[in-house]
């Protein structure tokens, strides 16, 4: 997983140095006319989401002067805060649980009151995370010894529609910082091994409010 993070940072850094922002000068009749081209695309990585075991890459594109669309896709590994948002304590922090790779994705429509990809914004969005793991359980068999130890493949899914507010700050020519906070509703769905029925059963948990906040570093082009 450290390798994935290092590769992501390396790719973004390489793009930033290889493609500096181009500045064009206006016509002779313009006084001090310096015009920057309109950048419409941003590639971002989310710093805080790494702490939740989610490693997404974000892409945002300006649709017009005030709206943009943002999508993301990534890998998940280890729902270490599952006991906070689920109804049980099963997570890869348990000694009997082995974390496995899952996936995540998101989609958002952003509204910028001043200018797209700059300053304040508000966005309805949807975030989906799936965490996978294997847990050692006791399974029933029809032959002796009748009860054996086996590895059950389990998972937990978070489906989160939410509203996000944020601010985009230009740190350098092509580097931006995206600060954001918001609130939404989280509906966990778990696939866990049932010790009475000796099989994995899917259960949808109660929907609860969930606050989120974060910080993204992006390359704009």
Image (cartoon, helix red, strand yellow):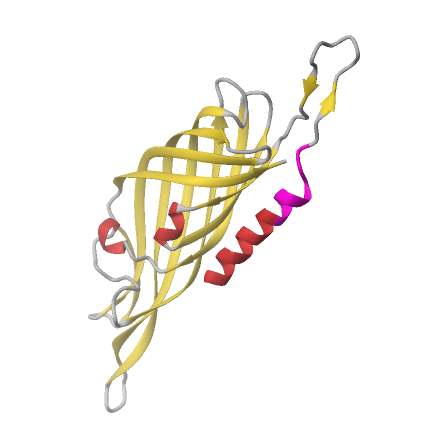
Res. 1 visible in picture: no
* Image location (x, y in percent) of residue 104: 45, 51
Location of the N terminus (image quadrant): bottom left
Q: Is residue 38 left or right of residue 177?
A: right
* Image location (x, y in percent) of residue 191: 32, 60
Location of the C terminus (image quadrant): top right
Residue 195 on the magenta segment: no
For residue 213, above or below residue 134: above
Res. 66 visible in picture: yes
For residue 42, above or below residue 1: above
- What segment carries the magenta color? 14-21
Residue 16 on the magenta segment: yes
The residue lying furthest to the bottom in this view is 144
Question: Is residue 109 or residue 56 the one in the foreground?
Answer: 56
- The residue positioned 34% from the left and 33% from the top of the image is 182
Question: Is residue 141 or residue 25 the one in the foreground?
Answer: 25
* Image location (x, y in percent) of residue 99: 36, 66
For residue 11, above or below residue 174: below
Question: Is residue 70 or residue 47 the one in the foreground?
Answer: 47
């Amino acid at each position: 997983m450290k390798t994935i993070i290092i590769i992501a940072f390396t790719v973004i850094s390489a793009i930033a140095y290889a493609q500096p922002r181009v500045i064009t000068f206006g016509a002779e009749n313009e006084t001090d006319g310096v015009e920057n081209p309109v950048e419409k695309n941003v590639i971002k990585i989310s710093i805080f989401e790494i702490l939740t075991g989610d490693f997404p890459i974000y892409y945002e594109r300006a649709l017009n002067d005030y709206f943009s669309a943002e999508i993301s896709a990534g890998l998940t590994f280890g729902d270490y805060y599952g006991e906070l948002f689920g109804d049980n304590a099963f997570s890869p922090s348990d000694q009997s649980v082995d974390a496995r790779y899952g996936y995540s994705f998101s989609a958002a429509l952003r509204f910028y009151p001043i200018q797209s990809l700059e300053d304040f914004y508000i966005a309805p969005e949807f975030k989906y995370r799936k965490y996978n793991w294997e847990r050692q359980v006791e399974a029933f068999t029809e032959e002796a010894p009748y009860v054996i130890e086996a590895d059950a493949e389990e998972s937990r899914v978070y489906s989160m529609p939410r509203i996000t507010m944020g601010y985009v700050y230009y740190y350098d020519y092509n580097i931006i910082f995206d600060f954001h906070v918001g609130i939404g509703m989280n509906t966990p769905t778990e696939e866990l091994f049932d010790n009475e029925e000796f099989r994995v059963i899917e259960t949808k948990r109660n929907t609860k409010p969930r606050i989120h906040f974060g910080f993204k570093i992006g390359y704009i082009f």
